[in-house]
Amino acid sequence: MSDLDTFRQETRAWLEDNCPQAMRKPMKGDTDFCWGGRNYVFQSDDQKVWLDRMAARGWTVPSWPKEYGGGGLSKEEAKILAAEMRRIGARPPLLSFGIWMLGPALLEFGTHEQKLHYLPPIARGEIRWCQGYSEPNAGSDLASLATKGEDKGDHFLVNGQKVWTSYADQADWIFCLVRTEPEASKHEGISFLLFDMETEGVSTKPIKLISGNSPFCETFFDNVKVPKENIVGERGKGWTIAKYLLTHERAMIGDQGVPTPLNVIAKEKLGLADGQMEDKALRTDVARHEIDAAAFMFTMERATDEAKAGASLGAFSSMLKYAGTEINKDRHEMILKVMGSDALEWEGQFSNNGEVARHWLRTKANSIEGGTSEVMLNIISKRILNLPS
Amino acid sequence: MALVLNEEQQLLKESADGFFAEKAPVSQLRKLRDDRDETGYSKELWSEMAEMGFAGLLMSEDEGGVDFGAIGAGIVAESMGKNLSASPFFASAIVGASLIKHAGSTAQKEAILPAIASGEVIVTLAVDETGHHGPASTTLKAVKSSDSYVLNGMKTFVPDAHVADKIIVVARTAGEKGDAEGLSLFIIDKGQSGLIIDQTVMADSRNWGKVTLEDVIVSEDAVLGTVGEAFPVLDKALDVGRCVLSAELLGISQEVLDRTVQYLQERKQFGTLIGTFQGLQHRAAHLYSEVEILRSAVLKALQAVDAGTNPAWFASLAKAKACKVAELATNEAIQMHGGIGMTDEFEIGFFIKRARAVQNLYGGYNYHTDRFASLSGY
């Protein structure tokens, strides 16, 4: 038996013994996600047990190095772990911007000390991070951001405002783009700073969205003192890290996982007559969407396989972000068509307080956040097609 | 299986791209058209293709081929799509060969497969009877009389009909129009009494023909596969064909995208390169995304064929997507080229005409979207 086969067997047995039954049921919505952090209230004992057991093995971040709280797994092993978790329907033990975004940035640009200091608490779900990028006047044109960090000797004095900060009101720390070199050009003057959201001068205000939910905040900095050692990478080189993370984020937003196939929802809602959906126009539209969605999934698969074979994704991730988010928006419009007016119930038990409608509205932001579809098309035009500017 | 070409396939791609760009570019098709060439393809090219192994991609070495599978066939078809290279490759080496391989007796395989692979014998399939694909709609009749069959009826849009040495005819031996049961395959040789072939000149300047059978009498040896049970094996061979046609559409789409992008980089209006206009950039970038997504769907479908599982779902997915993307790509190419795209002197027009013919062959967007839904259980 190969080493990987042994690993698969051992992993399967361990998951079987250690994943609580309640953690093998699909997550219904935001309330079932485990975000961790200082103020996080576990929804159940099982949720905490599952996190602790996985964190103890480093499996909340399976491919991070062991010394930083990870599992030290190879790509193949990580793939097996993911497959074995899928097999029993195990929930991810922990979701966080620390895992998805800050972690990869620190692993690439952080010092050994920073990695030792910041990564293990992320892996254990002890510190929850948020991302301070967009500002009221720096959205698609992110590099024109104006939040400033003045050099005060041993610290930067940060003043300004961020917006669309995901879950800032619940986060413990923020990774933040701050202009520290006012004389430099717009891309050269930005630094990547880390600081505690409890620092004096930091305040947040949730933004109510069209979905009625408030996953984003406005975040204000009023004379916030950030120690100089809290900078990642060099002064003025924060844009490089931001770009790296945006590429990461784009690949993530494009990859929405494998949701319930649209046709399954349609069959459940509308039934079949003689093996076919009765509404032929809708049937064709469902098939159109599913063909697009499947072809896109194959493209994600191809991108992964090409990356494994040594190709660099580069601007291709912009294409994945563009196509993936547009298809996801289309999927939710299709769900509305399949469900009819039932999809629009806003309150009440039948709809679980408007879950479908609120989720549909949430997807409208997919093609705005992390770079709009139009910005992605600009990047494809310039970096892939080499069109002149 | 990783969704990438392996080293051997990558080499095939490079050699096919080089070969067709040099030996059979669009100018060759233009010449065949302008000369009203009787054969409709270059025999010299076809024999060189056979020497390269391109006519035997689906055959094993024992069968006289090079055993590159459907992926190899797709790679070559994509190159031919980029260059609009005319040859009996699709009719004979893909569909003809697949039918003989899957339905043929040992004797039929031994007699025909090596001859297809060497390019000596051209085989084509005659299935459709109207402008809309529908194997089950077959009405051409084959009636048994003692130890022979008598065939009567008409087939249309048969690729390379007038240059084929053997035509595999789908005939109804039982049941009614619309039934998948009751279909049979017959191999009819060129020159057979009662076999009438009329060339159809189509927009794409390639070889198409109408095949009429008037009391064509063949022996039982002419039967390919099992009488009355041809549909599954026919559909399987058609699926191989559909995947390869999708690859040709991918080649066409990629080529017109590349040519359009190049034009945007060179053409000046309003004192500047038109490629600086965001209105055009975004259209080109969207098209690029669609072509990349099609590339994945095509490769996945070709892999499904080679994996030996039923590729029907993947084939319909790929062909439906290919039809959509090729339609978009060729329309956008003409629009973004402006007036010059409308001229016969410019080559873009050849691509749009070929694209539509390939889109329709063996089922267009609607046919495959419907089939995809049925195969998905709704």
Image (tube, coloured by chain):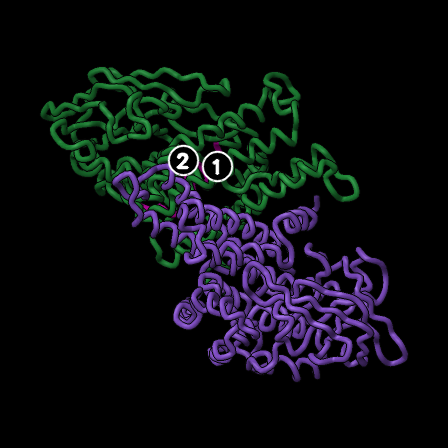
Image coordinates of residue A243 in percent, x first then y, are 29, 39
The rendered magenta stretch, by its main secondary structure, is classed as: helix
Tell me if B171 is positioned left or right of A327 in this view.
Answer: right
Image coordinates of residue B356 in percent, x first then y, are 56, 54
Residue range corresponding to the magenta coloring: A48-67
Image point (57%, 24%), residue name:
A357
Q: Secondary structure at mark 2?
A: helix
Image coordinates of residue A251 in percent, x first then y, are 40, 42
Residue identifier under label 2: A373
Q: Secondary structure at mark 1?
A: helix
Image coordinates of residue B130 in percent, x first then y, are 71, 57
Spatial distance from mark 1 to mark 2, Cα to Cα?
Answer: 8 Å
In magenta segment, residue A57? yes
- What color was chain B assigned in the picture? purple
Please say if A96 is above or below B221: above
Residue identifier under label 1: A326
The chain letter of the green chain reads A
Which residue occupies the foreground of this view, A25 or B190?
B190
Q: Quadrant of residue B228?
A: bottom right
Image point (69%, 66%), residue name:
B210
Please say if B126 is above or below A291: below
The chain that hosts pointer 1 is A
Tell me if A66 is positioned left or right of B290 in this view.
Answer: left
In magenta segment, residue A153? no
| Neighbour tally class for label 2: few under 14, some 14-19, many 20 plus, Cα within 10 Å | many
Could you tell me the amino acid type at mark 1? Glu
